[in-house]
Amino acid sequence: MAAIKGEVTPLLNEEDLKYQIGEAIVVCGSVYKIRRMSSFAFIVLRTGRSLIQCIYSSDYAAFDLENIKENYCVELKGEVSEDNRSKLGFEIRIKEVAILSKPAEEMPVVINNKKLAASLETILDYRPITLRNEKERAVFKLQEGICAAVRGFLMSQAFTEIHSPKIVYAGAEGGANIFRLDYFGREAYLAQSPQFYKQMMVGVYDRVYEIGAVYRAEKHDTSRHLNEYTSIDLEMGYIKDFKEIMEMETKLLQEIMASLERNYKNELNLLEIVLPKVEEIPCVTFAEAKEMIHKAYQREIKDYEDFEPEEERLLCELIKKQYHSEFVFVTHYPTSKRPFYAMEDKENQQYTLSFDLLCRGLEITTGGQRIHDYSEQVDKLLKRKMNPELFESYLMIHKYGIPPHGGLGMGLERLTMCLLGRSNVRETTLFPRDISRLEP
């Protein structure tokens, strides 16, 4: 009987090759581009993170160049040679090649240009292929970096990572924008948020976070809305003030920017990204923000309960001019526009102890303090004509004691869109799900 020992062949780290000048190596990848010269050829090999320049010459290669084509998956054997003109500081002189697989058809989109010459719809239709373009895939390496920074920072701040169910008995936000499904004859829903569960887990671990999918059955067809997106959620207990949550988010954003600068310079340079500075984030109330926009732009206030997208853009423009910050916290949103679990301001119950974070004209975070008192939470449900019996398992945390707490939810795709200066959130979504797209 054969036995599996758990011996794993380590994947090549392209960055380490610059320390192996003159050594023989073996590297696997896909042939990204072939550029034929008069007496030799450049073969650009696409590996998991890099494009490696390789040199073919019939003088020392033991194969015919005509035997390999672009988009072949190959194993190359060769020697690492120093080359300061290369982005990586080296190139590989190829000696042997083994063909591992060949495409059955020609590519529907040319992927090896600096920028894809295709519409966004075409790029998304052929997403499994177009992601192989070096700039397209760099977007999601940066998104990986955001998640890694979030996990590292929150773990350092005594947060515990949780994984809440995505099939639930009730929507966290209420209302009609929830996906219904048949759950063995019972009505269930796809989770709009891990809200109830992260509040429950504050009673267990004090501080928790989750990075996971959430679902919104909103029939929006805009550049900023998705029906499935990835939410970065955190909840923290024993807070004295909801401003503690904003302080935590400010530190989190500082670490995200610093971590991307440390670990993803290649991707930032490739995409020509200048990350926003995060020092202190200005904070204004919702009412103050409305008045600021009205005075600065002589813009009539039409909606006293929420922002229009244009108002978010104008507010960010004002804040950048006055405070040199690309971020702004807007606090004390009207009670009518916040969920039933949002704590109201004791000084003026028309407003909640809640906030949004805007960046470069886009809302990327919603958060605030939650109601922790049982009677207060039941009363608010009744005021909204909601049946407390339908929230029995959620109200259990209030009935049996929960500390003062609050948290936030941040859209990963919107944050990436904001940092990269993209105009459509689908550009920073791996496989978007909106009202018209269900595949690939």
Image: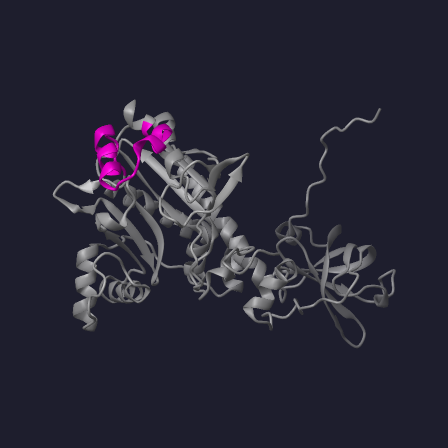
> What residue lies at 41% left-to-right and 41% top-to-bottom?
153
Residue 337 is situated, as x and y percent measured from the top left of the image, at 27, 50
The one nearer the camera, 80 or 207, is: 207
Determine whether 394 is above or below 225 in the image. Answer: above
What residue appears at the point 83 percent right and 56 percent down from the top-left corner?
96
* x and y percentages locating residue 367 in the rendered image: 31, 45
Image location of residue 203, percent across then percent down = 34, 27
The quadrant of the rendering that contains the C terminus is bottom right
Q: Quadrant of residue 38?
A: bottom right
- At 25% from the left edge and 28% from the top edge, which residue is drawn? 374
In-front residue for pair 174/200:
174
Q: Percent x, y for residue 420?
A: 45, 61
343 shown above or below 111 = above
User: Quick one: 395 or 18, which is closer to the camera?
Assistant: 395
- Based on the picture, tell me whether residue 228 belongs to the magenta stretch: no
Residue farthest to the front, as pictured: 185
Do we see residue 133 in this rendering? no
Q: Is residue 385 magenta?
A: yes
- Residue furthest to the top: 400
Residue 43 found in image quarter: bottom right
Residues drawn in magenta: 370-395
